[in-house]
Amino acid sequence: MTVAPNLPGIRVLLKRKRSDMDCCAAIAIDRAQCSGCGLCVAVCPYGVFALGEDGLPRHDGRACFLCDHCRAVCPAGAIAIEGHASRLGLQTVAESERGCLPRPALAEELVALMRQRRSCRSYRPEPLPLAILEDLVRIGTTAPSGTNCQGWSFIILPERADLLHFGSLCADFFRRLNTLAASPPLRLWSRLFYGDALGRYHRNHRQSVAEALEQWDRDGRDLLFHGAAAAILVAARRDSSCPGEDAMLATANIILSAEAMGLGSCLIGFATEAIRHSPKIRASLQLPGGEDVHAVIALGYPAIRFARPAARRKVSPRVVRLAVEQRLG
């Protein structure tokens, strides 16, 4: 994925390039196997390969971000990258090194999978095997990331008891927030100095959160995770090129893969907000200071199966022909 990185990400990328100057040996070419086809030269986005006088490629010593394109394109399997595994090491899903060629039937299956995935708010009580949760994390790492920094991290809450404890921490946070939002002077302060964040919460969420907290306290009814068995939290380093985008791309991989495995999933935005604003929750999750959680994914076996795919509002994309506008101008 190529995007405009944020300023901290640019600094990290430059540091990384300098340090990578010493690890160009991480890219190894088996010259006995190499056929000299030149595909690695053509595919490299940084142009760090060139064909030598013997017709075989050489790495010119400049740093690269180890995108793995050269290894993946090599028909002879002559390129290896130190520290890069060619397999994810999945425990519950079979892996194949064979590429998946584009075909209409595959596109139809993918679209059907995307359409059938819904946010699950009703789960069966069975626990999820830890191996499945670990596999979902590994699958999440197949997502693209800005400058290939792969700056994400993952936290697994593997059992229902872990989720309930997490839920109690979130409940404590929202109780305090509801108390603050009930104060007119604090809402006025928020409107004057903080863009009315507290006022918006008071208008849009305070009452429904209060009702959910009451049901949690009185009946133990879980309206936050809806009875899910486990959760995966997707975080990213703040100094990554584009941490939020990277984390959400990995999240999309996880929830689609969960659907393909027969699992239900739901993104819990209230939990993400609680983590963002509560030092106590961050400490409980052992979250490093330089990382933020961008998604909390509740997971479990769904208690309900839908007979039809999800409907969506019609979209009308804007088609902008910049080249035509330039000619007319």
Image (cartoon, grey):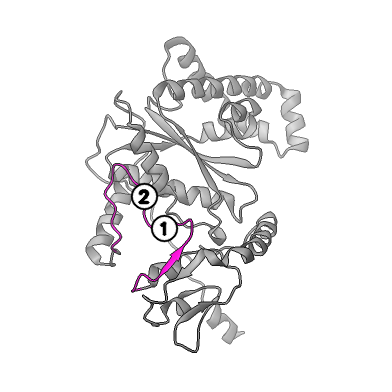
Image label count:
2
Magenta range: 75-98
Say whether residue 22 is magenta: no
- Most extreme residue toward the top, as rendered? 218
Residue bearing mark 2: 312
Image coordinates of residue 321 in percent, x first then y, are 51, 77
Tell me which residue sits at (67%, 64%) in the image: 18
Image coordinates of residue 277 in percent, x first then y, are 64, 32
Helix, strand or loop under label 2 = loop
Who is closer to the viewer here, 296 or 140? 140
Image coordinates of residue 136 in percent, x first then y, are 38, 43
Residue 188 relative to residue 134: left or right: right
- Quarter of the rendering containing residue 302: top left
> Is the C terminus in the top left, top right, bottom left or bottom right quadrant?
bottom right
- Quarter of the rendering containing residue 125: top left
| Mark 1 neighbour density, 10 Å: few (under 14) some (14–19) many (20 or more) | few
- Most extreme residue toward the front, as rendered? 32
Residue bearing mark 1: 315
Which amino acid does the dot numbered 1 rest on? Val
Residue 213 relative to residue 198: left or right: left
Which amino acid does the dot numbered 2 rest on? Arg
